[in-house]
Image (cartoon, rainbow, N blue to C red):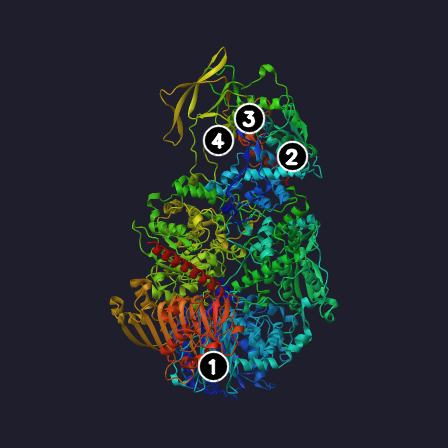
Amino acid sequence: MGKVTGFKELERQDRSYAPVGERVKHYKEFVIPLPEPEIRSQSSRCMDCGIPYCHNGCPVNNLIPDWNDLVYEGNWRSALDTLHSTNNFPEFTGRICPAPCEAACTLNITDSPVTIKSIECAIIDRGWEEGWIEPKISLRKTGKNVAVVGSGPAGLACSQQLARVGHSVTLYERNARLGGLLRYGIPDFKMEKHLIDRRLSQMLAEGVTFKSNTEVGITISVEDMLNEYDAIVMTGGSEFPRDMDVPGRELDGIHFAMQFLTQQNRRLADEQILANQSISANGKNVVVIGGGDTGSDCVGTSIRQGAKSVTQLEVMPKPPKMEDKTLTWPNWPLKLRTSTSHLEGADRDWSVATKAFYGDGGTVKGLELVRNEWEAGADGKTSMVEIPNSKFKLDADLVLLAMGFVHPKHTGMIEESGVELDDRGNVKAGIEDYKTSRKNIFVAGDMRRGQSLVVWAISEGRKAARSVDNYLMGSSTLPD
Amino acid sequence: MNQRSNTKERSGLYDPDHEKDNCGFGFIAHIKGKKTHKLVRDGLQILANLDHRGAVGADPLAGDGAGILVHIPDQLMREELARDNVVLPESGHYGVGMVFLPRDEDTRNRCVDSIIRSVASEGSTVLGWRDVPTDNACLGESVKPNEPIIKQVVISRPNGVVDQEEFERKLFVIRKQAHKKIWYPGEGDDGDSTGVFYITSFSSRLVCYKGMVLCTNLDSYYLDLSDDRMISAVALVHQRFSTNTFPSWKLAQPFRLLCHNGEINTVRGNINWMAARRATMSSKVLGEDLDKLWPLIGDGASDSATFDNALELLVAGGYSLAHAMMMMIPEAWNNNDLMDPARRAFYEYNAALMEPWDGPAAIAFTDGRQVGATLDRNGLRPARYMVTTDDLVIMGSEDGVLPVPDDNVVQKWRLQPGKMLLIDLEEGRIIGDEELKTSLAAKHPYQEWLDRTQIQLEDLPNEIGAMTPDPETLIQRQQAFGYTQEDIKQFLTPMGLNGDDPIGSMGRDTPIAVLSDRPKLLFDYFKQCFAQVTNPPIDPIREELVMSLVSLIGPRPNLLEPEGAGARHRLEVRQPIISNLDLERVRQIENHVDQAFKTSTLSATYPATDGALGMEKAIERLSLEAEEAVQSGFNILILSDRDVDSDHIPIPSLLATAGVHHHLIRTGLRTSAGLVVETGEARRVHDFCLLAGYGAEAINPYLAFDALTDLAPKLIQKVSVDELHQKYIKAITKGILKVMSKMGISTYQSYCGAQIFDAVGLSESFLSKYFTGTKCAIGGVGIDGIASESVRRHAIAYQGILQFSGALDVGGDLAFRLRGETHAWTPETIGLLQHAARSGDEKRYRAYAKKMNDQSKKLRNIRALFDLKFVDTPVPLNEVEPAKEIVKRFATGAMSFGSISWEAHTTLAVAMNRIGGRSNSGEGGEDPVRFKPLANGDSMVSRIKQVASGRFGVTAEYLVNATDLQIKMAQGAKPGEGGQLPGHKVDEWIGRVRNSTPGVALISPPPHHDIYSIEDLAQLIHDLKNINADARVSVKLVSELGVGTVAAGVAKAYADHVTISGFEGGTGASPITSIQHAGSPWEIGLAETHETLVRNQLRGRIAVQVDGGFRTGRDVVIGALLGADEFGIATAALVAAGCIMMRKCHLNTCPVGVATQDPELRKLFTGQPDHVINFFMFLAEEVRELMSQMGFRKFEEMIGRRDHLGVQPVIEHWKAKNLDLSRVLHSVYAAPGVATRHCEQQNHGLEKALDNVLIEQARDAIEDRKAVVIKSAVKNTNRTIGTMLSGEVARKYGHAGLEKDTIQLKLKGSAGQSLGAFLARGITIELEGGGNDYVGKGLSGGEIIIYPAKSGNFAPEQNIIVGNTVLYGAVEGECYFRGVAGERFAVRNSGVTAVVEGVGDHGCEYMTGGIVVVLGSTGRNFAAGMSGGIAYVLDENKEFDSLCNKSMVDLERIEIPTEDVDFEEVNSDLMKHDAQRLKGLIQAHFDKTGSDRAKQILELWEQYLPMFVKVFPVDYRRALMDLKRVQSEQSVTSENMMAGE
């Protein structure tokens, strides 16, 4: 540890944002990085804990104290190596990860965690800037062919790992471009897409073959794949959105969040959008149903598209502003989280359930809502109870459903392959070997664990790669 | 060895090898050699007066052994043998053998026959046999079955034997052969299966009477001793205090030449080295007889017996007794600039002949013509002597062992460290140490010989050292040797920058090596041994003068040809860690120094293609190569793994070293060549210690140097490569010194090869082959397992494993890392436990316990391997003892206020008091505020009060406010080490509680200076019992092999309670080396303790507590089944209170306010007593559930029930599957009626204390504060006078006590040990006579005045008045001693004012306050570690400057006063008025003691004043100045405020 008393002497200082008025005019990233000296002194706040809780808080188990120390010493290159040793794509997580590591940071006991995410981002950005990032091309080929299906963060991480130990990897993607949710789901203002492209470039050099516009189970049969490849890793994500069955759901102007977000990203990437399929928030009253991150992305995108108003509704009660740290830390706490998008001008309401949509001429005009309470039952589980006479209405020209994803899409690859599913409809596999019930088929990421964070996807992709390597070679030299 | 296992069966963990003994001893001799019976009777009287230094076990009549060595009573022998018509030749022409024979007739006949045949073979004849008359009525029941038949055999001087010298040698040869025939029988012979046969003495001069007899009964047993014809001019007596009581007649002392009080720590190495010499040994004097003496060592199980064996050889080989003693126990010559150069040369020269036999030792010896005594270099045993007008010299462990009229005393003195007392009975005079050594040193031109032959490595011509390789090769090598990032960051970097072994905190919670999934280094399988109780550790920093790192590389000379060594070259290094350049000097040495040396480098690697299975062959090959190299004339071997590469796997350097070392010992070639290790593997202190311990004379850690070179440009600090290397070497050597001193070993030469390690998890066959003699409680992996770990590392390095490419493994030993080593405390377990404790949610606790207990995937500790055996029908839970009863067995661990915050400390105390458990004060004293209950009924008092080596805040008041008094002998995280609280951490509050000055550093010495041995411990227990009879006295030990026998000794020393700490225990600050590698798991220590106590029938008398990593109810249950009554749980309780295992305690930056004194951080503490209580209640509930399933209703039913423990059937683990737990699980057989849990009380014998009378007579004073004067005669058996009385005062009046002189005790005689211990204010002891050791220990406000008998004829200022370690830990009060004090006067004094007329070595050591005036000379190392207080020393001979250890103090002249100041002013400012203060104290000394010395000084004050030196600690002066500044600022402020009003 560089500085024993750094945490006492220095205040937490994090990246700032461009002013709202300015940033909502475009779709570019608006985070203002900290200058190098500040990053270095922030990294000296790390206490190099005997038990680094951050390390467990982080799904890829980043060696946070280690690279903090290296940054403090100005040893950026080593910091980069250390960071890369556990995380293939720190530039993604450094931007969009909700940073459970910071929640777990010892200094979060007093609400001033080390700015781990910013430091991570600074390390990787600098790495690219300095040209330190090069393909790691394997010296020997194993002669084994592996297909990875789905090019989201799990698929990318898995492919990269497998290629680096000499397997011939083909990465399948049903969309035109690779990146999955990273590319299509996450708004550019949170993460610009050229970041993905340069990684893909690295992976190409490392020997990964990309096959886009190819949907396994539709374009190509699973059986053919099994014949062609020694192993298949399914990393298709959890795409099946949660819907609601209330009157008026069929009205125009009600869309799943992902339709909306994807379209905006395509638009920015100059992909063609058919006019009759265009969804726009411009000049509209927008209601986002669902209080999570996707909902928040809808808020920010709507504002940028020029919405008249944006309201975000959540069925659960408003979480406390501050968690009871004595009972939550170092775990991820339930607390009120306000995103940059929220700050750009959105109303939020909690404990609100949608009873119906109403419209005019087949187009949605508003929602009928009701307030509810959550009561704890005898078994300790809470259940929702409507508050009598609390019905109210809300105008809406565009409703975006952001209530999460239930499970992966079953039609196509999953059904054809016949792999066993778990209770929740995810593909069933062991958490250590990532093997499905079907020989030679592995699964990783949201397709296995259900909807989750990018960083979890990377983690699973890496671990699955190790398991595949182990399976094919009898042992593996890959890290997990 | 065979011998041993015959007599006492080794089973379970108990091993007779661990038995230790300390003792009382003494002699009386007539200087002119006049033989009388009275002298023999006096000898027996001495023995009787040392009774309290011995011990009795369960059987009150079975002592540990006593004996007497006297001249052969010629008349008695002559007349007795005449009855059988045997006519003896003249005295000196016949030899007498005293023989223990077995009762079984066949065996006995065999033994007798072997004597007869041996006598005959040496050309002598048996003149006759005599049945030694004995009366066994006084023998204990447990001893009688083993009572030998005791006979004396008388033999003639063979023809051709020219003198008595040669006759003695013959007798030696005969005895050896007679023993050999029986002890090491050949094929078809039976030997002596009873193990009784033993010849106690066989001499033409001396005869030894000894046995398993109480010392007071020796003459009732041996009727000869009461016979008037039993006359002698010398009587050496000895009374044994053994940790164990398995009757062994032959272990009683004296032996043939000596009796020994102490312990030889290096004995394993000494035995090996003796064996290794066989091939190089030859003797002109002994000639062919030398061969008949083998095996040289082995006729006794004890270190003392072994020492005697070696001494006999040296004497038989032609050395004088004194010379031989000086070789075996040399005084500290290495760093002693004051020593006469000729004497230094003598020692230096002899050092090459024999490594020191290191350890605390007071040895009395005689060959019949001379009698003498010597003390080890540290002076760790007391020995006082007296010369009388009637030509007697009386020596003993204490003063007053034989009453002598005052006017008969010519001189009273003590043996000083490293000094010898010798009386030549033939010359009829005492030969002083100076004369003796000067004459020996002058006998040969030692310096000349040295100049000619001694080569300093650094003086050899420069060579070229190897360069550091490119980064890629470097990292591959590091990987091949298992380097981790932690090695670089936590070890090499700080060591290279600071030159210190790095410090860490909290305990080790990672698996022992054999349970780890990761490839561990072989080093990690070994645990450092350390001294506890029977032997003190040393302070290598403050007592550096006794330490030496000098190592001699290369062949050793013929031990028995002392002059021959003058012809041989010897290569010396100042310390054993050598640079690349120095290594090349060794390698190229052949071309220098007349071709005296020839070096061969042997590769300790082997082809990678041979895999793991190839290693065994590789070592065999290496050993043979070594053997051939030596035989073909190479005399330095370098074992090198530098040629490691992708095709070559390195043999673990420790395995290579130990393997070759032992192979060469076995082939008798070891002393023909030196062993140097060139290795990339060694990097941490522990690694080097092991290489040294298994024979490396020098070590070159090339890869550590390479790593440092590589680091240099990357560091923020700009440091040169050379400096990094130097500092690293310094850090390592300092660390080695510390590890050596933990075991009480002071020289590298004797540490080398001494094997001071226990193994854990290595197979017996592996150990016996490569690590011969190393002990292991839990067997495990063998060569294949170890080899496969090497292979794994090699593969990581050279097979392009992506996981590790370009980066080292994270390690994760010190801090948790997910891809690193497994820890018990993880983010998950901490989170669960804290959430459970705070919410009171038992479900969360269960989740926590499950995580902790379930180790099916990742092993962390031994108990994971145990299986609890459940019954078919569980006891209904409501019938199981309630949780609120079970929690009473729980205590929190010892954590001082200072190491943790006030908030954390009191939270634990309140919690434990609420549930009826116990909290522990730790070693920092306790604020008296806490002694009173709080308004809400809570109490902040720590029921357990700790008494540690620093004695901080240990006052009479502190001691009476306890229910347990715990003597901390050792601490799990750092056994054998002291500690230091830096000045900046001692704030006003902590300073007050510790009776010290804020801002002044506080040092805890490694040993308790009043416990150097088991009988010393008994004394401290007695002292504590005296001050607070209601409290249980507890002794805290740390688990290591042999701890059970120490615990048995502790039980026999009357402790009520013993704690066995596991190595996982935590610490606020300790070298990581110790946290990780010292001590063993509690499972082992506890199992051994319980077993040994039960076997000794002592278990009922003592409560056994266990601690060190208890975290769940399952842990508690396993502890109980292995034999514990009570449980200490510190870390887990602290976690419940908020600790998150930051491991930053030593940095004061604890971010949760637990282990910090920073006011801002303390505010962050959120713990509540309820959190702690929740945790303990959950724990107890978990215990109850398991009890129910095992069928126990009461907790006590469970204690020691090992039959309920099994081994987990299937644990998938590549290493652990080989573990052998049978010795730990071995069921202990307890005879019917023998207790297997704590259920009896100790008999402390307090009713015999003089204080009972004193208290009666002081009733008025105690009740009504009325002044009383009490007169009494005292003798040395009146121990701990005034202490019980002080307890009464402190209980009633607290630390304030009574008004000065309220109780005046006027005593006359020689007072026993601990006179006035913890004496409370208001009590004054005035003693006419003399004091022994520990006078005024813990003085708490009282006053002690001692002067010699007024009728005495000697000059008091030249004689000793009080013994060693006077005023240890004294807090407050005054002392005046007319005469000289022994070693360590006023050690750790924190406030007493004392005047004395001379002191021994180490005066005022670790002193933190008070004033000491020495009106005479001091010994060496005065003021070592003295951080506070002031001393004034009269330096008449201008030598004080060189005697004082000036590392922490300044020496100042005393200014001649220019003004008169009043008394109050004098005492108000210690920075001024020295002259007035000094004069006042000397005046008081005169007034109270009538000292002539004081009178003279006062009369010639102007003349004397300039000769005084003021010793002023630098730290203290700064603190006083700070204090003064604050005070004046305050007074200015208050004046201003008043003015404002």
For disc 1, the marked residue is B70
Same chain, marks 1 and 3? no
Residue A225 percent coordinates (x, y): 65, 26
Left or right? Give the position of A175 relative to B515.
right
Badge nearest the viewer, 1 or 3: 3
Answer with mark 4 or mark 2, whichever residue precedes in sequence.
Answer: 2
Report the amino acid beneath label 3: Val
Badge nearest the viewer, 1 or 4: 4
Left or right? Give the position of B52 relative to B463.
left
Per the rendering, the mark at residue A338 is: 4
Q: CA gap, disc 1 to disc 4? A: 94 Å
The subunit carrying tag 4 is A
Q: Neighbour class for label 2 at 10 Å: few (<14), some, many (≥20)?
A: many
B1117 w.r.t. B436: above or below: above
Badge nearest the viewer, 4 or 2: 4
Residue B5 percent coordinates (x, y): 51, 64
